[in-house]
Amino acid sequence: MRGVIFKGERVLEIQDFPDPHPGPDEVVLEMKASGMCGSDLHFYRAPAGQALAAFGMVGDDAGFIGGHEPCGVVVEVGAAIDPSVIRIGDRMMVHHYDGCGFCDNCRTGWPQLCDRGNVIYGATAHGGHADYIKVPARTLVRLPDELSFAAGAAISCGTGTAFGALVRLNVNAKDSLAVFGQGPVGQAAVQLATAMGAEVIAVDVAAERVARAREFGAVHTINSAETDPVVAIKELTRGKGVVKALDCSGAPAARAAAVKSTAKWGSVAFVGEGSTVTLEVSPDMIRKQLTIMGSYTFSTVGQADCAKFIARHEVEVDKVFTDHWRLDDAVDAYRNFDLQTGGKAVIEF
């Protein structure tokens, strides 16, 4: 089979690997869609062999197939797997983490928080930018028939991350919500929050992303390269601020603006990784009775809930995709994706 290897310093290779075969508790998927995530660019851009360190992780990332948003069809199952649970031909997403399987976090579907460390497919184990992927059966999440494989790939990271944060914020029809950062995660957050009934304000520094946010359901849009977003949000909310805010950018200025633009008794979630934020604790937090939380991706149950919600509410997840590629075009795909001028990209098979 073919697989994409990130070599670092903006170099990747498509290499040949033996076709995988499952152990007793494993499954092999034939890939149908493998999403390209902004996190992949850490591995694409980093000095050779130092991508994990650049992403704040420990370990050796050399030689692993990239892609942590896999979605495909079951083609082979291990001998220990109950055939009434997983069958050949089943459409499946992959929860792209695995852990010990025994600690409390693993048992509740959060292997990325495993007490004994974890595996991340596409980073510390072979991922989805390949013809096939072999994973433990417990990592599989069923893809509803109504959804495309590309949608399943999006749910497997960016869209699922947005959904997980919105659930933690308990977003509903009573809320006004500001979403800072209109990359793929922010776009998904706008789509999903709109489906949840919230009044959404989308904020970004790029004019083209601000313009596109209305297509995803934003009621108001703010170009924060031209307008102070805190002032603009206060004007839109009659001086009170939004009930809830979500930062998907990871930028210090956006994080601070999310906090400052939130009303008393409000809630803020950060999902954008990296960098820092500086806040004035008393006026920004304590005297507003503000709740600030970090939200790290989603559980296996949360991934399934996200897919069911999208199917039930007919959310057009495929709208986030601006670029569709084939595996043989991976070099061009990542060269283009590295420019960060488009939306979500996906490799399809």
Image (tube, helix red, strand yellow):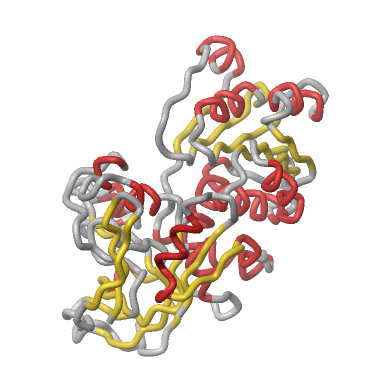
- The answer to whether 67 appears left or right of 174 in the picture is left
Considering depth in this image, is 143 or 134 the residue closer to the camera? Answer: 134
Residue at horizontal 62%, vertical 67%? 318
- The answer to whether 203 appears left or right of 11 in the picture is right
Considering depth in this image, is 138 or 207 the residue closer to the camera? Answer: 207
Residue 315 is situated, as x and y percent measured from the top left of the image, at: 67, 64
Residue 72 is situated, as x and y percent measured from the top left of the image, at: 42, 78
- The answer to whether 47 appears left or right of 300 in the picture is left
Residue 150 is situated, as x and y percent measured from the top left of the image, at: 53, 71
Residue at horizontal 55%, vertical 59%? 344
Residue 308, can we see it? yes
Residue at horizontal 61%, vertical 60%? 320
Residue 183 is situated, as x and y percent measured from the top left of the image, at: 58, 48
Question: Quick one: quadrant of the C terminus?
Answer: bottom left
Residue 85, can we see it? no
Residue at horizontal 54%, vertical 66%? 307
- Would you place residue 258 above or below residue 25 in this image? above
- Would you place residue 30 above or below residue 294 in this image? below
- The answer to whether 329 appears left or right of 97 in the picture is right
- Would you place residue 288 above or below residue 90 in this image? above
Question: Quick one: quadrant of the N terminus?
Answer: bottom left
Considering depth in this image, is 323 or 175 the residue closer to the camera? Answer: 323
